[in-house]
Image (cartoon, helix red, strand yellow):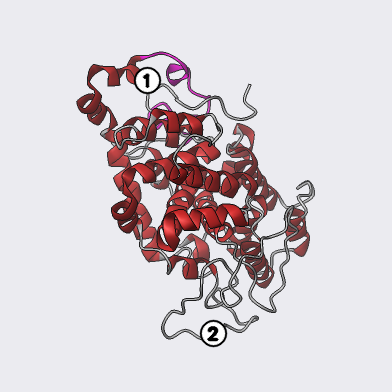
């Protein structure tokens, strides 16, 4: 799919990741300066932040991977274990397994555009149609080749529970290898973000293209006939109107994630237009909907509070509370995020409210921010990233946790 996983995207992503690492490392200092001694309470208090680590988590990295470079933690530390190859096209695992990983993500997010284009890719690179059907219809993976089965299981667990069991993780490492698994999870994370953007803007299949994924809902019809999405058509220069279906190397011009991105201004534009308070709210919404303790707690402490996000609004997101009584802008964002990540289908009324509230450019950028945080949550969950030592978690127990 065009504009999804290229060198420029990876460079920008790495730079953003490095910036987040610096923010996390400076959280304690910033809080002490801003709030005085009270800010130390989350560091020194008891609770699950000080409980024993899971058996397969390393005490130095506080995730399932050994620490490679002192002073680097979280997402950046995890990604140091990657192979360094272009995972989308040149993974050591081969195109069949990388396309299978993308299909697993598309299935878990009920994303028909992403699924349909990548089903054609999967068939083209020789993935067994029986394996594709097992993912499409959520059938048991018993009887499939071991590597295919574990890739599907990883995708299912990360999508459905926002976690990865120790047993599945162990099997995946043994079958795929550590660096290959990091590559594969990072690819799944990338396409999780892509799925969110496609769903937010209700990307339908191009005219004449078949949709191959059974959906638990009917897609809204609030789309433009040319772009087949909620965003009007913007053609890029020197591009044909549509690539040939069977010679296709990219998503058809005027559709897909690259077209969606043309409508945005980027995070610097969003910060200038809406401020960091709103950006922190978007981060917390994504963290809450993915049960990501590591995304939530440092960002509540080191970002949301200092940027003026009110405790009452934070608590609405934290506890998935009712939206009546909070500012319309906040309510529009929270409702949008809940539908996007929980049901994978943003209703026409919800979209119309958000569009009226934020305008097209800022809404595209808000969605891009939430989508990137969703991708971060996938990587953190797969490798069971724990909070820094002594930091008390601020999210309630995960859904389904005992």
Q: Residue furthest top?
A: 46
What secondary structure predominates along the stretch shown in magenta?
loop
Q: Residue at x 36, y 65 (%)?
A: 8
Question: What is the C-alpha distance between the residues marked 1 and 2?
Answer: 56 Å
Residue 147 visible in the shown view: no
- Seen as rendered, the residue at the extreme left is 33
Q: Secondary structure at mark 1?
A: loop
Dividing the picture into quadrants, the one containing residue 59 is top left
Residue 32 x %, y %: 23, 24
| Residue 116 left/right relative to 226 | right
Residue under numbered circle 2: 241
Secondary structure under the numbered disc 2 in the rendered image:
loop
User: How far from the left and from the top, in percent, is residue 73?
Assistant: 35, 37
Query: What quarter of the picture does the C terminus occupy?
Result: top right
Q: Is residue 316 visible?
A: yes
What residue range appears in magenta? Answer: 45-65
Identify which residue is drawn at 22% across, 28% down: 34
- Residue that label 1 marks: 390
Q: Quadrant of residue 397?
A: top right
> Does 48 appear above or below 270?
above
């Amino acid at each position: 799919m065009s504009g999804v996983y290229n060198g420029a995207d990876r460079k920008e992503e790495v730079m953003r990741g490095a910036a987040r690492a610096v923010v996390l490392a400076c959280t304690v200092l910033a809080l002490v300066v801003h709030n005085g001694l009270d800010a130390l309470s989350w560091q020194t208090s008891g609770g699950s932040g000080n409980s024993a680590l899971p058996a397969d988590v390393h005490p130095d990295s506080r995730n399932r991977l050994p620490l490679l470079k002192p002073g680097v933690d979280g997402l950046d530390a995890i990604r140091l274990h990657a192979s360094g190859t272009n995972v989308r096209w040149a993974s050591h695992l081969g195109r069949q397994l990388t396309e299978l990983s993308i299909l697993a993500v598309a299935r878990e997010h009920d994303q028909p555009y992403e699924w349909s284009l990548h089903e054609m890719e999967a068939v083209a690179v020789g993935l067994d149609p029986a394996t594709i059907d097992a993912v499409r219809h959520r059938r048991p993976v018993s009887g499939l080749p071991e590597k295919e089965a574990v890739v599907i299981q990883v995708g299912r667990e990360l999508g459905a529970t926002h976690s990865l069991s120790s047993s599945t993780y162990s099997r995946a490492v043994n079958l795929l290898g550590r660096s290959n698994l990091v590559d594969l999870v990072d690819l799944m994370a990338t396409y999780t973000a892509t799925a969110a953007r496609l769903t937010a803007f209700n990307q339908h299949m191009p005219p004449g293209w078949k949709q191959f994924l059974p959906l638990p809902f009917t897609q809204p019809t609030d789309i433009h006939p040319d772009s087949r999405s909620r965003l009007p058509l913007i053609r890029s220069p020197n591009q044909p109107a549509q690539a040939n279906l069977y010679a296709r190397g990219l998503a058809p011009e005027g559709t897909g994630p690259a077209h969606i991105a043309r409508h945005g201004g980027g995070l610097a534009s969003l910060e200038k237009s809406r401020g960091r308070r709103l950006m922190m709210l978007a981060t917390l919404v994504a963290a809450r909907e993915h049960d990501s303790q590591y995304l939530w707690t440092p960002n509540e402490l080191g970002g949301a509070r200092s940027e003026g996000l009110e405790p009452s609004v934070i608590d609405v997101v934290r506890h998935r509370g009712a939206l009546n009584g909070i500012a319309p802008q906040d309510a529009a964002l929270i409702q949008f995020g809940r539908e996007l990540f929980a049901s994978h289908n943003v209703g026409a009324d919800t979209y119309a409210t958000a569009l009226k509230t934020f305008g097209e450019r800022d809404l595209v950028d808000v969605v891009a921010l939430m989508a990137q945080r969703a991708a971060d949550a996938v990587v953190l969950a797969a490798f069971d990233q724990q909070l820094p030592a002594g930091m008390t978690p601020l999210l309630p127990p995960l859904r389904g946790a005992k």
